[in-house]
Every structure is written in structure tokens, then in C-alpha cells.
Amino acid sequence: MAPTTQIDSSLKNGYQSNGKVKNNNSCSVIKCNATLAEQKISIRGLVGKLLSSPNPDKEILSLGVGDASAFAAFREGRDVSRCIMESVNSGTFHGYPPAHGFPFVRRAVADYLSWGVSQKFNEKDVFMTVGGTQAIQVILTVLANQGCNVLLPRPGFPPYEATCEINHIEPRYYDLLPNSNWEVDLDQVRNLTDSKTVGIVVINPNNPCGAVYSRSHLTKIAETAAELNLPLIADEIYGHMVFREAKFVPMASLCSIVPVLTLGALSKRWLVPGWRCGWVAISDRNGALSQVRMAMERLMNVTSGPASIIQAALPGLLSDSNDEFHSNVVKLLESSEEALFHMIQKIPALICHSRPQGSMFMMVQLDYSLLKGIGDDMEFASKLMKEESVLILPGTVIGLENWIRIFFGTPPDLLKEAMGRIMSFCSRYA
Amino acid sequence: MDNRREKWGYKGIAGVIPNFDKTVRGYLNLITSHMDHSQIDQKPMIPLGHGDPSMFSCFRTSTVVEDAVVGSLRSGMFNGYANTSGIPSAKRAVADFLSRDLPNPLSPDDIYITSGCNHAIKILVSVLSCPGANILLPAPGYPYYEVNCESTGIEVRHYNLQPEKGWEVDLASVEAQSDENTVAIVLINPGNPCGTVFSYDHLLKIAKIANKLGIFVISDEVYHGLAFRSKPFVPMGVFASIVPVLTLGSISKRWLVPGWRLGWIAVNDPNRVIRETKMSDTILKYMSTSPQPATFIQAAVSDIIEKTEEDFFYKTILTLRESADICYALIQEIDCIICPHNPEGSMFAMVKLDFSRLADISDDVDFCCKLAKEESVVILPGTAVGLSNWLRITFAIDLPSLEDGLVKLRNFCNRHK
């Protein structure tokens, strides 16, 4: 349990020793949830701070946040918004959706997720969530118990840690290996696990590294998890967003080895993070997760889920009539990544050890010997913004100091311009 | 190996997972499970227990509202992430809307856009919870408050609403329940479940007591503007110079789109009491990891608020008034049911069961289960909202169905005399 918040000395003068402020407009000292009050800085917080001091003479170019929705180039092909307009104009979806989602929506997601998976999903295995954010929260909340821990990748995605904190779960980090396609360090996973570990989160296709794991590596992960009696939490927010020779293998296809909780959303593949529509899907061949499932049903009975009009559009959105849209997105990502990689190769101070094959991010190491006057990744990011108005994410905030995360979900031209500025920035500090 | 299997299971963290059975939905599920589906053709279900009338054509939202959201989608500009506290145009529109009736205008910085009023409740309860704190909730009330308090650990204390005084707050019970660990009092006005609209004078008294006790007010105004008789709705923010007020609201009820999940918290704090604590920061921090409302729906809020025609609201009020009148009149004809107060706002009436006139019915839950079974009429038992042996009747349903349902209720009562 979080300790009682002490009286904040920054409050107005004049409070009595029992903590109540008694003045003309008396109101007690508002003690707040201590865990929340002390939360560490988030991606949003840091990005906000960086964006507040750009070079005023240069337009801001953001390669910092995973949101490609603003770029028209990505929206070729079918207009995905049409599906929602239809549900709005029908007038039949303005009411509260049932808990867990409309049955026809859960069915559509179950069918979509069953692609490439021998154990098909049933509509009852699917729970609609308000984006990937709520999916993460629901999964960690139902798995949590007193004194437990969960295994998270490093580098990783900070909202996992934030959610752990709120649920009093201890996060333990396993490394992704930068020289081996960012694969999971399975020996370390074994060492970190104890009787209080409740699960392991695997992000594939990977944010922030862009790695796409092979079936053989995923199988090894599944086998290790089974050996350790851990369910797999498969974060597939970037599912199907793979290019070149990479193949996306849903973790659920390995559920004969270990139970899997898959989380996904419309956000990335459909380029609509603002729609806040995601899901959790349970693959549980042997009933090992039956109590977790029950807890999830109970928990989600008291939440409202994604907006009704968005849910109602899902069958249309998930249908294969959007294939042209999806392949256009992937083609663009591929050419942007290509452009990015070639420019990185021209900048000696930046090193990409394992090239991304999916998602929208690349992790790049900083070589400080070639960056005189720059001591760490936060300083790199901050100076880059101040001098060149380019936003990248310092690796510290995602668990890997001395690295930076570069987003390539932008049209190639924008990327080239931004990288050009990064190149001249680095050469100034050489 | 086997003994380690158990750690995959959910292990007695009862405090964290909210108790669904005690929610409105939970009780309605229980009641409807008693319906006799074999007679569903002769006796189709008549819902008088819900809080969502949007399925009835007489309560369909305005085309202006639908067009607003289609427009924001069509622009293609609102598919990305929004700021944590909401997009500026939505915050400004809500601030302006609420300020119409307030002496101290609100700024967009005072507004937090949430996924409906339920989400606003969750945020505030989570932010306020810390060991030893307690919060004052009305009885009868809206069980979502209790459910969330249970899962965050903040202690619930109930103050009474007085049926014999038009469901006004029992101010003595407020004082009695409050102590130095009380952080806030929750008011629901217009009232759910009682259908009341508090007078200016009564709200002023509440403000003064809150001031005296050193607690602030959470004013749940999700039924803002749905006062359909002569008593005007007065927002609690009017008294913000006496006591800080956190107002909750949404587009769900007034604009009849509860499924869109768009609400707000408005901080009425002209004396900057709340602002100078950590609370605003804590709200933002909680919201930064919390599920948000869809960006394009936020983008439609300014048009929804500014362009929805007055006729639409007028029509909704008229429909509600007519429904409330019919409900009250028909209830008067039923011996064993007493309605102490003719509803004047929101969508509900609280009515009392007189068990001296009822045979073989043990309590309100039993009454509702049997009613569902025999007549396919679904009413919410008062136990769900904190008042056993009462019923909450929703009259926001098309008139023919309302009449039909109430006649069937009367028949049921006659059969069980």
C-alpha cells in the first residue's frame, strides 16, 4: 500500500496541525493518491518538454512519437472513416455498448485474429478495450496479486511500467539483444523469474526496436515461458506491419505450448490512434487462465469500452477490402525505413546494429566519441531540438541510455529532411 | 510443477476488481435472467430499469450531433492522439457552455475531457483515494461511485436523501458522517435515482455546510438541463466562491449519445484552493495513462454544444415531462406503491413498496424478479441504488410502452395482493 501522503509544504500557509486548511474559504488539505502524485516522467511529458523549446527559425519535424495519422500519403486507398460515418448515420449505435463489446464486434475481431492461427478465437475470447492503453491496464490488473512481479522488455514501452506502479506490481526488465535482431535474452528471463512472477510481456513487431521475431525465436520464447509457468502477454499493436522478407507470426499460433493473452488495436495498422479502439484476446487451450478470464470479465463489466459508433464500424474495418490501404502503408514504411537506414549509415556518430523489419521505429546507438560536448541521450535530444527543431526520443525514457528512438512513419521526404538536419547537427559536434 | 500453476490464477485481490453484481447492469442482468422467454412473443420485454433511452425513436439525438461527428471524421484531421486533458476546442466549448450559467466564468484550463461521466468518476475517486480518506455519497445514489470506491480503497460514508422532503439532502446526516478525513461530498443533481432538482436555497445550504466542514463538492450534473418542470436547474458551480466544486458532466444524457463516451470534469475554483494542491497535477498524471475519449468525437464537441438547435432540447424536455406525468399518474393508481415525489428532472422516479399490501413477496429484488418473470417488465430494485424495498422506475421510454409497462405493473400488484 502506498504510504500516506505527507502534508505538502508547498501549500498555502495557515494550516492547522491536523492537516485542515482553515481560512475564509476553508477546505481540507487534499491528500492525493501518493502513487499517482509521484509518477515518473512519461513519453508524453518528455516530448512536451522538448517541443517547448525548438529553434524558432526552423519548422518542427517530429520523429519522436508513433503517430502517422496526420500524413495524407498514408491514407491512399479506401477511406477507413466511412465505416464509422455509416454507423453514425444509422442512428442505431448511440446507446451504451454491452460490456466487453457488441457480440458482432467481438466476433469480427475473433475472426480477424484467427488468421494464421490453428486454434481459432471465439467471440467470448475477445474483450474490446479503449485502445492498447486499456488493454495493457486490464491485463496487468487481472494478473496482479500481492507482491508479484512481471517481466518487461528493455528497451520497452513506458506505459507498462506506469501501469505496474499503479497496480503495485514490481516490473523486472529482461534485455533485448541489440546485435541479435533485438531478440529476447532468454537466460536472463529465467534468472529473473521467481514464484511471484505473473507473466512476461513480449512486443512483436517490436516497439521501439522495429524487430520482427521469427517463428523459431517465438517458439523458444513460448517454450521458456511454459517451462517457467508464465503466461505470455503478446503485445501485437503493430501486428502485420512488417516489410521486406519479414513475416508476422501471431503469438496465439503457439498457444499449444503456453497460454497467451494477445493485445492489439486499430491504432497503428489503421493509423487511427485517436480512435481508441483495441482488444484483449485469450488463447487458453487447457483452461490454465480460467480464473484470469473470469477476473477480466468482471473487471470489464464495469467499464464502458470503446465508443459505440467506432465499435460498430469494426467489421467493415477489419474486412479484407482494406488490403490495398494496408499494403500502401507498409510500402511507404518500407521506403521510409530504407531512406532512414541509408542516412544513418552516412552519420558516423549514429549506429544501427539491427535493422528494423517492422513497426515504425528504429533504435540507434550514440557514439559519444564522435559527439564532443554531448554527454547523454537526453542532452542529444534537447540540443537537437534547440538547434534543428527535430524531435527524436531519448532512449533513457524507454530504458536504454545512450540510444535514441527514431520514428519513420512519415513520408520519405520529411524523413530525409529531418535526417539531413541531424547529419549537420552531428557534424557540428564531431 | 503443479503447485506453481496456481500463480496463473486470479488470487483474492477482491479490492481491486470492482464488484459487478452491485452495479445497475449487474442487477438488471439478474432481473432480466428471470424473464420467461417462452412468452416473449405475447409479452415482449418492457424496459423500465435502464438509464439509456437512445434506443427509442422519440429520444433519438439531433442530426446536428450526428453531422458534427461525421464532419470531424471527414476532415481526416482528428485520427491522431489528443492532449491528455482533451483537445483545446472541446475544452473551450465546454468551458463556455458551463460558464453561461456561472458567475465566475471557466477557462479551458479548468476542463478535463473524459470518456464519459463514469470515467470522470473513476478519475476523481482514484485521485482522492489514500489510506484513511473517506467520501460522502448520497443514499439512494448511483452505485458506480460505490463500486469505484471499493476498488480504490477510499472509505464510503452515506448521507441520506429525505423522501418526505422532496429527496432533499439531510444536512444533519452530512455533518454527522463527516470527520477530518472526509475529502468531499458527492451530489447528484438533477437526481439519479430520485428525479429531483435541488433548489437554489438548498444548494446554498449544502455549500455552506461543505465550507464549514472543510470538504469540497463533487457535483454530478450528467443530467444537466433535464429539469422539466418549473424548478430551474442550478449548477453547483454558482456557489464556487463558497466552496470549490468539481462538476461532472457529459454529452450522454442531454444530447442522448451515451455510447459515444464523452464527458468532463470542470474545476470551479475561483479562490484557487484546489489549484494550489497537487490535485490538478495528479488528475493529469492519472489521465495520461488512462483510456481517453476518441479524438474525432472530442473535435465534434464544439459543434455539438454550439449548434444543436433549441427545439431539440425543448422536445426532449416535453417528452420527459409527459412521460413523468403518465408515470406518476399511473403509479397513484397502484395501492402498494407510493411515489412520494413527482419527478421534476432526469429520467427516474423512486417509489416505495408497501409490503403490507403485498403477499408472498419478500423484498424489492424478489418483487422485480417476479415482475420480470410474469410480465416481462424490467424495473430496477432500490437495493441497487442503496434503498431497499423501493424501486427505481425509468420513464424515459416511448409513451405506449411506458403505459403498457405500468399497466402490467398494476396487474402484477393486484395479483399479489
Image (cartoon, rainbow, N blue to C red):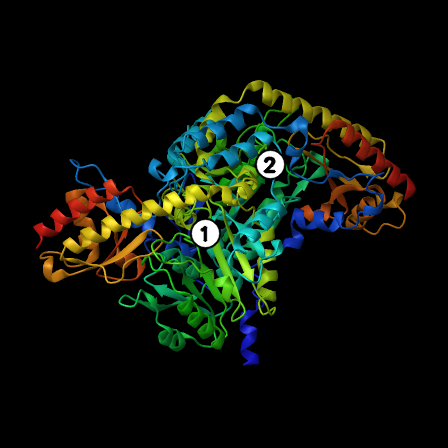
In what element is the residue under mark 2?
A: loop
Chain under callout 1: A
User: What chain letter is assigned to the residue under label 2?
Assistant: A
Could you tell me which residue is drawn at 77 percent across and 47 percent down? B389
The image position of residue A94, as x and y in percent, is 59, 35
Q: Quadrant of residue B41?
A: top right
Residue A22 drawn above or below residue B19: above
Total numbered badges shown on the rendered structure: 2
- Inspect the image, locate mark 2, and give the three-letter code of the amino acid beneath it: Phe
- Closer to the N terminus: mark 2 or mark 1? 2
Q: Is any atom of residue B16 visible in this view? A: no
Residue at 37% x, 36% y is: B109
Please name whichever residue, A344 or A278, is drawn nearer the observer in this view of the structure.
Answer: A344
Distance from Cα at disc 2 to Cα at disc 1:
23 Å
Give how far across and how far down residue B378 sits, in percent.
76, 42
Asked whether disc 2 touches disc 1, contact meaning CB atoms under 8 Å apart, the reply is no
State the residue in front, A42 or B236. Answer: A42
Q: Is residue A140 above or below residue A421?
A: below
Tell me where residue B317 appears, x and y as whole percent.
Answer: 64, 24
* Residue at mark 2: A93
Q: Quadrant of residue B380?
A: top right
Q: Position of residue A430 (x, y in %)?
A: 8, 55
Residue type pointed to by label 1: Gly
Asked whether, in this view, residue B224 is left or right of residue B86, the answer is: right
Is the residue A120 above or below the residue A220 in the image? above
Q: What numbered label is drawn on residue B157?
A: none
- Left or right: residue A293 versus residue B113 is right
Can residue B326 be seen here? The reply is: yes
Q: Relative to the observer, which residue lies in front, A47 or A156?
A: A156
Q: Which mark is residue A132?
A: 1
